[in-house]
């Protein structure tokens, strides 16, 4: 082999190695978490596969909880909410795509293959609107809810302040356990055989209920297009503050199930938008859409 052939072969090998390295770096960049055009489409700024996991797991938890506490009281109501939940992810993703592409800065970042760092939408709070509209039905039996929240307030937020630090965690966990037991007993103890009637143990607290007229007005308010999104947005902001309090987030194991605190504007707008989306689904399936209570 001549010197020219040797140099030429070496150059080809070097160029081939450089080309392979460049392709590998390009592929790595496309699949990095925060850069790459494929990431912009398949990851957090436009679409995230993890949303499907959230949709399934959160849906099972939310619907089972809603049925247990009475937020869904009829098969028809459950059916409409299931339809809304099936449409939830595509509508949420489409809305997020439109918002990011309409925003000049975000649009430029996405077209350059980078995800915007600003979190404008949250599926967690957006999905809350589907079931939060049933809250008035759940709290019609007000007594068990007062027992639940009163016990948690006392055992999680008050008593640990006066107890030794080493006992604070145990007191909080015990209070949550007692609160759940009181709620279940006050709600369903009357139908359990060989168990004292809740009214005989808890007194009027077990039988305290909202009147039909009050419950009906609250249902109409939460399910009206002009008032409902506002009420659910305020409720979402309150829950965002409460569930991210250090008194709760420092409880062992429990903090894994609690959300991270989001900006109040993100919570309110997403909860309100999710509620309006659900009410539009109700209007489309039943032909009834109320603007005011």
Image: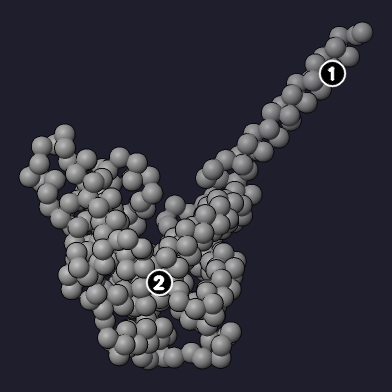
Quarter of the figure with residue 181: bottom left
Residue 36 relative to residue 125: left or right: right
The residue wearing badge 1 is 8
* Label 2 CA crowd tier, 10 Å (few <14, some 14–19, many 20+): some
Residue at 86% across, 9% down: 3
Name the front one of labels 2 and 1: 2
Q: Which of 231 and 114 is in front in this view?
A: 231
> x, y percentage for residue 272?
40, 74
> x, y percentage for residue 284?
58, 85
Residue at 22% across, 56% down: 152
> x, y percentage for residue 26?
66, 38
Single out the residue that lies furthest toward the front. 194
Single out the residue that lies furthest toward the left. 162
Q: Which of 187 and 274 is in front in this view?
A: 187
Residue at 84% across, 17% down: 9
Q: Nearer the viewer, residue 98 or 58?
A: 58
Q: Is mark 1 on a helix, strand or loop?
A: helix
């Amino acid at each position: 082999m001549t010197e020219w052939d040797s140099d030429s072969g070496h150059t080809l090998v070097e160029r081939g190695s450089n080309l392979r390295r460049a392709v590998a770096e390009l592929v790595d960049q496309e699949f990095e978490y925060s850069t790459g055009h494929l990431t912009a489409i398949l990851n957090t700024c436009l679409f995230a596969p993890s949303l499907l996991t959230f949709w399934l797991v959160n849906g099972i938890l939310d619907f089972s909880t809603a049925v247990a506490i009475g937020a869904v009281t009829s098969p028809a109501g459950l059916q409409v909410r299931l339809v809304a939940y099936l449409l939830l992810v595509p509508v949420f993703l489409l809305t997020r795509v439109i918002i990011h592409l309409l925003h000049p800065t975000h649009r430029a970042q996405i077209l350059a293959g980078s995800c915007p760092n600003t979190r404008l939408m949250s599926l967690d709070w957006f999905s809350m609107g589907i079931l939060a509209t049933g809250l008035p039905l759940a709290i019609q039996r007000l007594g068990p809810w007062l027992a639940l929240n009163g016990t948690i307030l006392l055992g999680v937020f008050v008593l640990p302040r006066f107890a030794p630090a080493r006992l604070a965690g145990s007191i909080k966990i015990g209070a949550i356990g007692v609160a759940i037991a009181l709620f279940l007993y006050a709600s369903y103890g009357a139908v359990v055989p060989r168990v004292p009637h809740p009214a005989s143990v808890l007194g009027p607290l077990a039988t305290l209920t909202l009147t039909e007229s009050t419950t009906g007005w609250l249902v109409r308010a939460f399910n009206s297009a002009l008032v409902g999104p506002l009420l659910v947005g305020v409720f979402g902001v309150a829950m965002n503050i409460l569930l991210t309090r250090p008194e709760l987030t420092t409880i062992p194991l429990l903090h894994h199930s609690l959300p991270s605190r989001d900006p109040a504007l993100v919570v309110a707008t997403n909860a309100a938008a999710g509620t309006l989306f659900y009410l539009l689904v109700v209007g489309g399936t039943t032909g009834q859409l109320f603007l005011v209570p």
